[in-house]
Image (tube, coloured by chain):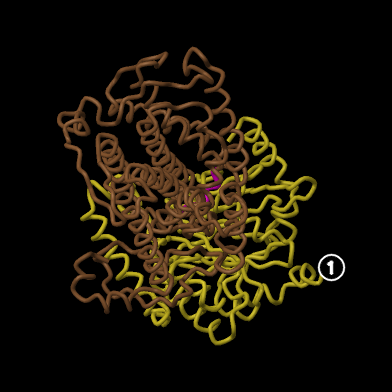
Chain colours: A yellow, B brown
Amino acid sequence: MTDSQASQVANNDSSSEEQPANDERAANMDKENVVLRVEDLVKSFGALVATDHATFEVERGTITGLIGPNGAGKSTLFNLISGFYESDAGRVTVNGTDVTDMEPYEIADHGLIRTFQTPRKLEGMTVREAMLVGPREQPGESFTKLFTDPESVREREQRNLEDAQKILEDFEIDHLATQPATKISGGQLKLVELARAMLAEPEILLLDEPAAGVNPTLRKKLAEQIRRLNGQGTTFLLIEHDMEFVMSLADPVIVLDRGHVLMEGTPDEVQNDEGVIDAYLGG
Amino acid sequence: MSLRAIVDDPNVYWSGLTRAEQGVSGFIAGFVVLLLGGLFTGILAPTYFLFLVGIAGMYSLLSLGLNVQWGYTGLINFSVAAFFGIGAYGTALASASSSPVAGNLAPVVGLFVALVLAAILALLIGIPTLRLRADYLAIASIGLAEVVRIVILNEDQLTNGSAGVRGIPTFFDGWPLLDTFPQTMPSVAVSRLPGGTVVLGQSFWSALLNVVVVVSFIAVSYFVLKRAHRSPWGRVLRTIRSDEDLARALGKNTYRYKMQAFVLGSLIMALAGVFYAHLNLFVSPGDLSPITTFYVWVAVMLGGSGSNRGALFGGFVIVAIREGTRFLNAFEFIPFDVAPLRLLLIGVIIVLLMRFRPEGVLPPQRELIWPSVVDDAPEQPDSGVRDSKAGESND
């Protein structure tokens, strides 16, 4: 962070008292076991303030939902957290490490992995090949090790392939393993993306609209998988527009409006909150 | 794919090939018969034939190099000629008797000088551009090719300028046995079919040695690339080509991978330059003309972007077109001079290719997983696993 940015943060800290965003209904900042902490994150594109002092925490072991009307800045927030955008001010902490403005691959090394709203297809690969991109720190990803230590490359590749096969079986899509990755449906692609992200062994997984464009049957399957993986210890933060999907899955739910956190609460609290309803109706 | 598999049961092997592979095999077989015919009837002189094999090998090397950059990683490099030229000048300036800087060093030293210079040039152009979007490398590399050519043309005191570098030794100069191989080999007289004999003398044997050089360069590059292509390393490169953001989100340092691929490809291109310098024994700034870059791009797209075999095939086809058109004039029923039309012919081929087979003749079709990890390679349909256009940008 540059000096000017640092002073900006200091200014923001002092002015944050007056911010309506940080009123008593905003995010709960007293969680015990925090995986991801976002503090006063700011990002503007020209005159548009896409993220306006967003502050929240994600507790370990939860499925935290992130909702908000179109243009509330959900995707921008994801891009800031995962390092794809550089923030103007604020701080992102993963597992207690300050990862603000790190490169995406460095943030991934700290255990934060993300998926994309529209998964792009890996042309020329089969599904299981595309899965093998997931695991981190493979010895075979070092060019020199291919020639100096082919045995360890082979061993890890073998293990990764078995893991990939197993997770495809868990997801009940193992019949797709040797299909071209470009020939599967959009919904299946979402499942493959989630499965691949799991191979990277994330502590917290950010899912950007996992249910968008997925048919109801597959959507149910996707929700089951997220719940199952959550039971096995992965923390989830997910953006979702499908209210039924997110309300049945996530607790707590954080509501974002015009770049700041409007409120945080249980699905029931959120659904019955007037401020939230106003935000969605454009009031 | 081994020779043993072919010998064991040729029919099974043949039916295991895709239609494209069968077509290419048939084409190659026919072409070889044609060449042998030319050799035996005396239309094609053996020494000239070996020279052509050398040039074809050189283009194949260049294509292999570009394939690492464009085919694997999606890096658009329009300065193939510059890396080729740096390779040629690197070894020439180190080993030639007329070199204004060093000179008279062993060609093996020249080889290393060439590789080091190419790596430095690749880093210099890669550091500022590889962090940016793919287009910037394309733009910068167009400029780079011209900058390198013009610097070589004008830096008289370093490169002899437009006079070029003369007196380059052959690659095996100073080696035991191989150095004097062409002189010590006896002249062999071979009788041709329609009568008369051809004497295979000193020039034939030195041409043969050149082929040995280029074949070993190709063999080493191909071995390295084949392993790299099937490795997790190659998989990250292919992910970057399809979707760089995805690779970044999965924790891959894409800048580093792009740099490695760019340098590796450039080194292979420089190898082609090294070979050329010791084949031609003279290099000049004219050898860096941008047309080389153009030919190599056509070769890679023709062969199938991302396919090592395709790159080899493409390189040979380009030389076959370039040099083969000379022989078409022998057919008197063609009422005009065919040779000057070769660029037009290449243009027609590109148009037909993009229209009917945009993925190239031999696109990568098999799953690329580390060998011996999977034994149940899936059956692939002829259309292959890729269905996007080879000439398309990667987004």
Q: With B256 as the anchor, is B141 left or right in this view?
A: right
- Of the 4 image quadrants, the one containing the C terminus of chain A is bottom right
Q: Quadrant of residue A70?
A: bottom right
Q: Residue at x 51, y 37 (%)?
A: B81
Q: Main secondary structure of the magenta part?
A: loop
Region in magenta? B72-77
Residue linked to disc 1: A283
Residue at the location (30% across, 71% down)? Answer: A162
- Along the viewing direction, whichever of B280 and A127 lies nearer the viewer: B280
> Which residue is located at x 66 percent, y 53 percent?
A54
Q: Dividing the picture into quarters, in which one does residue B263 lie?
A: top left
**Along the horizontal axis of the image, is A221 left or right of A269?**
left
Percent across and percent down for residue B33 are: 35, 62
Q: Nearer the viewer, residue B284 or A266?
A: B284
Label 1 Cα neighbours within 10 Å, binned few <14 / some 14-19 / many ≥20? few
Expressed as whole percent of the image width and height from the top left, the position of residue B247 reads 48, 56
Out of B287 and B205, give the one closest to the viewer.
B205
